């Protein structure tokens, strides 16, 4: 049996020879373009401190919920994978043991995008040429650990080697941004910028909402118990993040619902949220109103708005109680954009100066709702295939469903949306290959000419993200 780890040069390209030849030519042109990563969840501390990544498991397994959710689904406990518990209770500390456990279950990832990304990381970032198996686990662990002790594998060196032009992180308005501030004064030329993610202070059902809003008031010198003080405080923190390089906001609401309420209703909802007697329907109304308020603020301060609805967050209460947020238990929900966005679009849909980027976890909305909306309203753009669809099949499906109605130029390039820093080049490479494969079919069917396809390939890999996110 072949135990070599190979990355085939034609991976993800069409099997048909004519299309494959075109895809190769297109890819040749975009493979080396710089990476623009306008949305993600890497830790700014890595780049601010530039300390070595600790060990293979801490870098590649413990922080990546794509990885451990699969193992969890097969009965492997999160404790045994070293995922920290909320109560500080015992979890596996031996990184080598975690890695071995992971390697024993590696076969579970066959056919998944995680396998593609991970193999790319092993092969391209760490120079591994052997397949990960229970037998090779130790040897591969040592090889990666050895790399991590070298200066070429420090976070800033990797950033440069990955040819990243800009990398966005995601922060709460309550974040003092110490790492970003340190970065800005460090003299390093890498560009790591924050994104304003206000969920903790605009969602009355977010844990600690009242304290968060009070803290927001302290940080800004505003009385956030009043509607006008609350809005001024939010706007103040937007300006603060923008001064640290932010160009965008991000909103992770459970639905796309928006409202355009009279001021008296807004004041009443805020008072109820403060009193702790807001109902779940009213909380939804509040969140929906806040999307409209954020759009209004974006019109004023120029921040691009991203809306990421449709996740049933923390679906598994046992895991949530023991391990907290973002542990791979977010599940897609049916999402209605046509009705839910109407109040916001009635007010802002025709604003050419505003950019609202829509994402979905509900793939059935691509051709029915999202492409027609983005193909009409000047304020709307369509974000790339995201979570569960940020996969070769998902990306292909996305292009097939949206291009005829929204074109390429109402989309915004690619987001890797990742916490797993070493996988950033892998994810962009997958997106570039899938887009080239899609374009190759259009060329082979004589629907566009090859010179047009070359231009589009470069736009999808590089230019559109810079344009849409104003970076
Ligand atoms: Zn994200």
Image: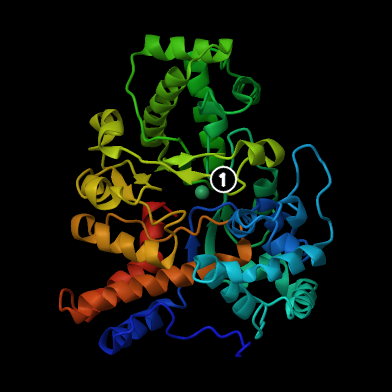
Q: Decide if ligand 1 comes within 8 Å of the CB at mark 1.
A: no
Mark 1 Cα within 10 Å, few/some/many (few <14, many 20+)? Answer: some
**Residue topped by disc 1:** 329
Which quadrant holds the C terminus? bottom left
Depth check: 343 or 74 in front? 74
Mark 1 falls on what kind of element?
loop
- Looking at the picture, tell me which residue is in the foreground, 130 or 210: 130
- Looking at the picture, does residue 417 appear above or below residue 20? above
Percent position (x, y) of residue 283? 46, 21
Residue at the image position 61 percent from the left and 36 percent from the top:
317
Q: How is the image coloured?
A: rainbow
In the rendered image, the quadrant that contains the N terminus is bottom right
Position of residue 318 measured from the top left corner of the image (x, y, whole percent): 65, 38
Task: Tell which of 279 and 315 is nearer to you.
Answer: 315
Above or below for 245 versus 100: above
* Left or right of 114, for residue 394: left
Q: Among all residues in the image, which is located at the extreme left?
A: 446
């Amino acid at each position: 049996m072949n135990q070599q780890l190979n990355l085939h040069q034609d991976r993800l390209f069409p099997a048909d020879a004519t299309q494959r030849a075109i895809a190769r030519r297109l890819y040749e042109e975009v493979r080396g373009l710089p990476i623009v990563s306008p949305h993600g969840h890497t830790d700014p501390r890595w780049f601010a401190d530039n300390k070595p990544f600790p060990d293979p498991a801490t870098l590649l397994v413990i922080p990546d919920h794509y990885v451990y959710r699969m193992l969890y689904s097969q009965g492997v406990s999160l404790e045994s994978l070293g995922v920290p518990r909320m109560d500080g209770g015992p979890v596996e500390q031996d990184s080598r043991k975690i890695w071995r456990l992971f390697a024993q279950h590696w076969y579970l990832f066959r056919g998944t995008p995680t396998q593609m990304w991970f193999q790319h990381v092993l092969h391209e970032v760490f120079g591994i040429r052997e397949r990960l198996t229970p037998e090779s686990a130790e040897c591969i662990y040592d090889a990666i650990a050895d790399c991590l002790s070298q200066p070429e594998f420090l976070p800033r060196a990797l950033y440069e080697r990955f040819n990243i032009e800009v990398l966005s992180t995601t922060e709460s308005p309550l974040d003092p941004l110490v790492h970003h501030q340190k970065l800005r004064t460090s003299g390093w030329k890498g560009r790591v910028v924050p994104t304003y993610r206000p969920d903790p202070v605009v969602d009355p059902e977010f844990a600690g909402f009242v304290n968060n809003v009070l803290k927001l008031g302290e940080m800004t010198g505003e009385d956030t118990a009043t509607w006008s003080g609350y809005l001024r405080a939010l706007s103040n923190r937007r300006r603060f993040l923008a001064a640290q390089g932010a160009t965008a906001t991000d909103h992770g609401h459970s639905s796309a619902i928006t409202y355009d309420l009279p001021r008296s209703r807004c004041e009443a909802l805020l008072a109820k949220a403060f009193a702790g007697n807001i109902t779940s329907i009213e909380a939804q109304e509040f969140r929906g109103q806040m999307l409209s308020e954020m759009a209004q603020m974006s019109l004023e301060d120029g921040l691009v708005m991203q809306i990421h609805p449709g996740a049933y967050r923390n679906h598994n209460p046992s895991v949530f109680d023991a391990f907290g947020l973002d542990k791979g238990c977010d599940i897609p929900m049916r999402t209605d954009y046509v009705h839910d966005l109407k109040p916001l679009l009635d007010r802002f849909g025709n604003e050419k100066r505003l950019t609202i980027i829509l994402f979905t976890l509900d793939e059935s909305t691509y051709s029915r709702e999202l492409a027609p909306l983005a193909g009409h309203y000047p304020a709307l753009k369509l974000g790339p295939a995201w979570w569960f669809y940020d996969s070769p099949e998902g990306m292909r499906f996305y292009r097939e469903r949206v291009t005829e109605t929204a074109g390429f130029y109402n989309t915004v390039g690619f987001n890797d949306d990742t916490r797993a820093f070493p996988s950033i080049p892998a994810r962009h490479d997958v997106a570039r290959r899938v887009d080239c494969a899609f374009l190759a079919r259009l060329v082979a069917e004589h629907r566009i000419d090859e010179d047009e396809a070359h231009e589009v390939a470069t736009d999808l890999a590089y230019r559109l993200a810079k344009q849409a996110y104003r970076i």
